[in-house]
Every structure is written in C-alpha cells, then in structure tokens.
Image: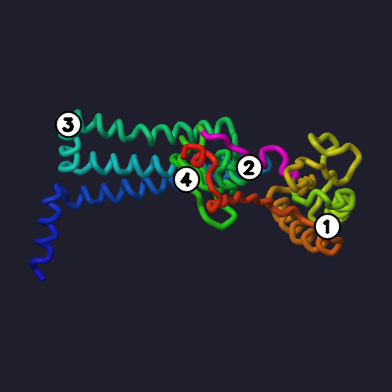
Amino acid sequence: MKDEPGKFESLMQGLGMDLLLLLKVIAILFAAWFVERLIYFALRRGYAKAKAQGREEMTRYRFFRNGVRTMMVILALIAIIYTIPSLRSLALTLFAGAGIIAVVIGFAAQKAFSDIISGAFIVAFKPFRVGDFIQAGETGIFGTVEDINLRHTTILTFENRRLVIPNSILSEDRIINSSIKDESTCEFVEFELALHADVGLAISLLQHQALLHPDRVQGPDVTNMEKPGEAITVRVTKINEGAVTLRMYVWAKDPVTARRMHYDLNEAMLEIFNANNIPFALPIRRALHTDHTRPNPTQHGQA
C-alpha cells in the first residue's frame, strides 16, 4: 500500500507534473467549460429574443454555437500544453526545428480553413438556412438542412439519413432552395397515353381528380405555365412515337406535401384511366431479321 503513492508520484514526475500542475489543468478545463456554457446561454438568450426572425437567426445560432465550442476546445488544449513543462518544451522544439512539418500541417489544414470560410459565407449571404428544404447539386439528394457547423452542413433526407457535406463543396455547388421565400410548390404530374387515347376525356379526369385532393392549394395569380383563371392546367407537352405526354400542374403548400400528392395522383389515375378505357402508351420495339439461308447477291456476283 505504501508503494502506491510512490508509483503515482513517479508517473506524475515522468510527465513533468506535480499536484499544482494537475490542479492548473483541472482549472483550465473547468474554465473552458464554464466560459463555453456562458457563451452558450448568451447565444440562446439572444436567439430567444430574435426568434421572430425565423430560420436565419437559427442558422446564425447553430453556426456560432458550434464555432464557440470548437474554439474553446482548441484554446483549452493550447493552455494545457503551455502549462505542462514537458509538453511545452516538446511543442517549442517541434515548431522551432521542424519547419517542414509546419508546412505539411499548414498544407493539410487548407481544406479545413476553406470549410470554415465557406461556412461563414453561407451564414453571411444565406443561400440556405437551418430548416430549409434544398437540393445540393443538379442531381443531388433532396433534404432538410439540420445543422451548420465550422466544417460541414448536415442534411436530413427523406430516408431519415444524415447527409454530411463539407461547406467548401456546398458553397461551390448549385443549390435548389424550395424554402428561401415561399415553400408552396408546383408539382409536375405526367402521364404517357397512347396516341389513339381520348385526350380530352383524360384531361377532364385529371383536373377533376386533382381538385378533389385534400393537399392541393390554389396557385399564385401569376405563374409560368398555367392558364390564367383555370384551377388545374393540363397541357400536351410531348408527342412521341406511339405516345402523347400530358403534364398537369398542381400546387401544394410545401415540397414534401407536393411529392406525396404526386404519388397519390399516380395511384388514383391508374385506376381511373383503366376504368374509362384510356390506354397508356406502350413502348414500340422494332426487330430486324436477316435470312442467312438466301444467297448474298454480292458474293454471287464475285463468284
């Protein structure tokens, strides 16, 4: 039992620490935690007062909260290294005599600094905010912005998965924001019918079914493709070989509701078109057959 304190003291001496240094390290950790909590509650209080500003204030709050937490961890680590003599001398030796290592570390940190600066630009210029429904890239995944920190942005997808994208990549990519001003969405619902189908009857059935859907909302007065004064517009957008494409323009309160309404209309119109003998388009396939049993005129002439 008497040997246990001696082992502990030797371990502390090997680390270049004594009881006073240990107390200093504990004090640094406590101070870092306390300051982080003070700033956190101050940010929460400021956010509560400006909550009426909505998603923009939430975006700033999330970014600064994550930034403060990261900075306090870095400052606490630097303070601990400076406090412990053995670690301080090791750090001074590395920084003083290892210029190549410093260059390598600086080069490796370029990406991190790029993400931090891009995150600050996102918060400042607000191409999207926490809670916005966006698509990152032309063929990217749709989802709701859940969090923005110094390094990356987290997007919650329809599959309830978190898509983590570095801020530098997200700031350089094209972003489709469905929530930045107005969340109401015009959904394109398309059907390919046979050329001999009764297009007039099909349009009437589409309009009637869309008007009955509980999630449909009235579109804005000035739109791009809808006919003025018409509740539901259906247009013939394409005539291909053996098919005619009908596109219906239906409005919903937000993108998620619009997508759900689209699927409901697909299911309903499948049953309605079949009940009214309106045929869907079928793909046309052409096959070329060659009769290898007949003589080739070219070969016969050469002979």
**Could you tell me residue 211's position as x and y percent?**
86, 53
Discs 1/3, front? 1
Q: Are marks 1 and 2 in contact (CB under 8 Å)?
A: no
Q: Residues within 10 Å of mark 1 (few under 14, many from 20)?
A: some
**Could you tell me residue 209's position as x and y percent?**
85, 56
Along the line of sight, which residue is nearer the eye, 240 or 129? 240
Gap in angstroms between the C-alphas marked 2 and 3: 46 Å
Magenta region: 173-187
The secondary element bearing badge 1 is classed as loop
Q: Name the residue carrying label 1.
A: 278
Q: Mark 3 or mark 2, which is nearer the start of the sequence?
A: 2
* Dot 4 amino acid type: Leu
Residue 98's label in the rendered image is: 3
Q: Name the residue carrying label 2.
A: 55
Discs 1/2, front? 1
Gap in angstroms between the C-alphas marked 1 and 4: 68 Å
Q: Residue at x 17, y 31 (%)?
A: 98
Report the side of 28 relative to 268 (left or right).
left
The quadrant in which residue 137 appears is top right
**Could you tell me residue 179's position as x and y percent?**
67, 42
